Image (cartoon, rainbow, N blue to C red):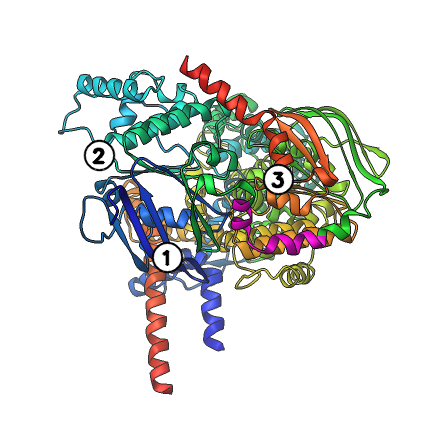
Amino acid sequence: MENDIVLTMRGICKSFPNVKALDHVDFTLRKGKIHALMGENGAGKSTLIKVLTGVYTMDEGEIRIDGTDHPIMIRSPQEAQSYGISTVYQEITLCPNLTVAENMFIGRTPGKTVDWKTMEQRAGEQLENLGIPARPRQQLGSCSLAVQQMVAIARAVDTDCKVLILDEPTSSLDDTEVAMLFKLMRDLKERGVGIIFVTHFLEQVYEVSDQITVLRNGELVGEYEVKDLPQVELVAKMIGKDLEELSVIKKQERTEDQKQEILYEAEGLSSSESKPFDFHIAKGEVNGFTGLLGSGRSESVRAIFGADTVTGGKVTMKGKNVKISKPLDAMRSGIGYLPEDRKGDGIIADLSVRDNIILALQVIQGMGHPFSRAQAEAFADEYIKALEIKTASQETPVGSLSGGNQQKVILARWLLTHPDYLILDEPTRGIDVGTKTEIQKLVLKLAEEGMSITFISSEIEEMLRTCSRLIVMRDRNIVGELKGDDLTQDRVMRTIAGEGRMETAGALEKEGA
Amino acid sequence: MNKNKQSGFLANHSQLLIPLIAIVILVIFNLFRDPSFFSVSLASNNNGEPVLQGNLISILNGASELVILAMGMTLVTAASGGQDISVGALAAIAGSVFVKVLKGGPSISAFTVLLAVICCCIVAMIFGSFNGVLVSVFGIQPMIATLILFTCGRSIAYWINGGATPTVESPIINAIGSFIPGIPVPTPILIVILTGILFSVLFRLTTLRLYIQSVGINQRAARLNGINHVGIKLLAFMILGACCAIAGVIGVSRLSLINHETLLINIEMDAILAVAIGGNNLGGGKFRMIGSVLGAYAIQMLTITLYAMKVPSTDVKAYKAIVIIILVVMGSPVVKEAFDRYLKKFREKRETLAGKEAA
């Protein structure tokens, strides 16, 4: 073992029913390094993290940690903690209604009684030490998300921490906040903490990381030094061969969409959640909204569908003026919408697969015209077969299906309404790679048949593969539109970030001053 | 094949298991105690009309108001994820309106009774929509929203008839409250059956069931699929209002008078309990109305059994509570899960045994 290694994982395997989530994965973390763990959704990143933190127990493999000379078994998060492995998850898991100090020491106050004074003093020292702009007695909920995130980190590193895992820590932060967080990460790195950084944002990886480990389909692709791996190669490694295959399908379709008629057009459309914007889509076109999380891309499509309160704008569909102020209006005009939050906005978990599939068409049909049982069964059957939905029966509650199959059920729901225009917001998030490719292929096939589709995904690669036009958003404004030869990873990244790196660097300086 | 079907039946109807078990146990218990407990006899009443008599009939008859309210309560529970505790008070208002309209005419005829029923239904549905608006538009928790009417409902009922407890003597009212001449089955039982049929027709001809369940399980998703969740909740409360009116009319007709203080007093808790015993999730979502109906009959059977055992009426509530604790614990998710695990193990054992035999 090299001297500076804090953690090695060798030949880690973990299976779930139907899927091998990790297949002999190796991972090495060095002291004082930030190590990015990369891969598309479903690549096995979170499974690996969960094995390491004791949420899952591995089926096979060996974990060694600095300071212990035999392989260790991690059976629970508490045990992981005792080995010096701390995790900060994507969603903040602290209590917003307690103070910062209370949050830092909750559940591990020394002794039976709480010594408030000592606790607050220690919290204060720790915060100052790490340069976190929060006061110990401040209520956590009153801090910005970034500061809350940093308090969570402070809590994690307070104990004798060797390995700090940051699982998508930046997904709900803006640029300035990200810069603050990175400063803290570099500080911790100086102190010799090994940091595992899981994120979707490629730019950020290149900004702070030292090494990168790439996973794909539960297998290890390789470990690389950041300086030796250009961004494009990283993406290629994350995606695998699929890229070329799909780009061939698209090239054919892209040449002929020039003089298509406009299907949907909005002028100055705005909602309670989005600023006014203009937008149009042609018949058979696949376009997409892109931008960082919170850039307003989901809010824009929600405005199109009438999902938020529409506050203004002129909308035409097939050349006719239409008023879309609620989802039912949109549905009646031939628009379908697969929402970003599958669990919260999409599935009706306790209802059967059948009821979930027929729901939208049934609502369009009207309350007084229920489908007969036989009709509903026929509809469900058709789409369960067409989309290869894996379910025990039509009666199975949709909530008990896997994420990918739940997503297919919602797709089936909208395909059943035969929409002219289908909006897909993050249809491939959190589902397995196989289903993901299926959905991408389906999108292209539907477009070929004349359906217009707006596609949103956090993975730019995926959007490049499916869309012939990209609308780029930043801070709730449309900042660019890319098509044709401009549709490259690099161009998209640059447009999204504006002067990306410089902005972040500027923010960092401001923060330091 | 046959076995598969059986397990399928169990899976589909496991929700009804608890009320059915409760009823079966009560039946067996009563038969042990008194083999003739459930005997039904055909007797004549004072007017020489043939009528059915016996404990079974009085259970079915006595439960009528509760069953009707439980049906409406099921919908409100499913759609809003909460309960309406004002049903007793609302039934008193409806009953008062019913009497007020009857008293308004010169004499009580079939027409005035029909008019009175329609009037009290409309009034009850208006009050129901008051509850519904508080819940669906203002987002107040159902129990808090309906607490208002629970508190003031009987005062409103008092004002309607100027504080009096007028009697309404008429053969028609008598017929509603007890027997229609020539038909030996008590009329309230017939009204319950009619209400049940109305609901099943409603569910067959409209998508109400799908909509209510969707709203109850995931309101946001329901909205994004074009369902008007405000309207659906409002509708559920209005339907419950109509149920209150029917229950109020039965209650008034039984005694031929309105006593706004005692009419269907405390029935709201039994109605909620019936929904719970029927295996419906009080947090809303999927529902089986038949479960609530069975639950209501189980509660009534328990009450009648206790009275038949000469338990003093002051003690009845305590005994009832014991039985209810048992039922509710039996129906709890923890017990259900344990039961499912046991069933699975049992099945696996059987399969391995069968496998060995085959080998």
Question: Which image quarter: residue B215?
Answer: top right
Dot placed on the residue nearer the N-terminal end, 3 or 2 = 2
Q: Secondary structure at mark 2?
A: loop
Chain identity of mark 2: A
**Residues drawn in magenta:** A233-249
Q: Amino acid at mark 3?
A: Gln
Q: Is B73 on the left-hand or right-hand side of A269?
A: left
* Residue sitting at the far left: A111
- Residue A404 spot, x, y in % from top left: 54, 53
Helix, strand or loop for the magenta stretch, by majority: helix
Please state which of residues A160 and A500 is positioned toward the viewer in this rendering. A500
User: Looking at the image, which residue is at 55% across and 25% down?
Assistant: B138
Q: Residue furthest front?
A: A228
- Residue at (38% x, 49% y) in the render: A48
> From this viewpoint, is residue B120 visible?
no
Mark 3: few/some/many CA within 10 Å (<14, 14-19, 20+) = some
Q: Name the residue: 28% across, 33% down.
A: A192
| Left/right of residue A1 with respect to residue A435 in the rendered view | left
In whole angstroms, how far apart are the C-alphas of marks 3 and 1? Answer: 66 Å
Q: Secondary structure at mark 1?
A: helix
The mark closer to the camera, 2 or 1, is 2
Q: CA distance from mark 3 to mark 2?
A: 41 Å
The residue wearing badge 2 is: A160
Residue A402 on the magenta segment:
no
- The residue tagged 3 is A489
Residue assigned mark 1: B22
**Quadrant for the C terminus of chain B in the image:** bottom left
Q: Chain of mark 3?
A: A
- Residue A14 is marked as none
Q: Is residue A240 magenta?
A: yes
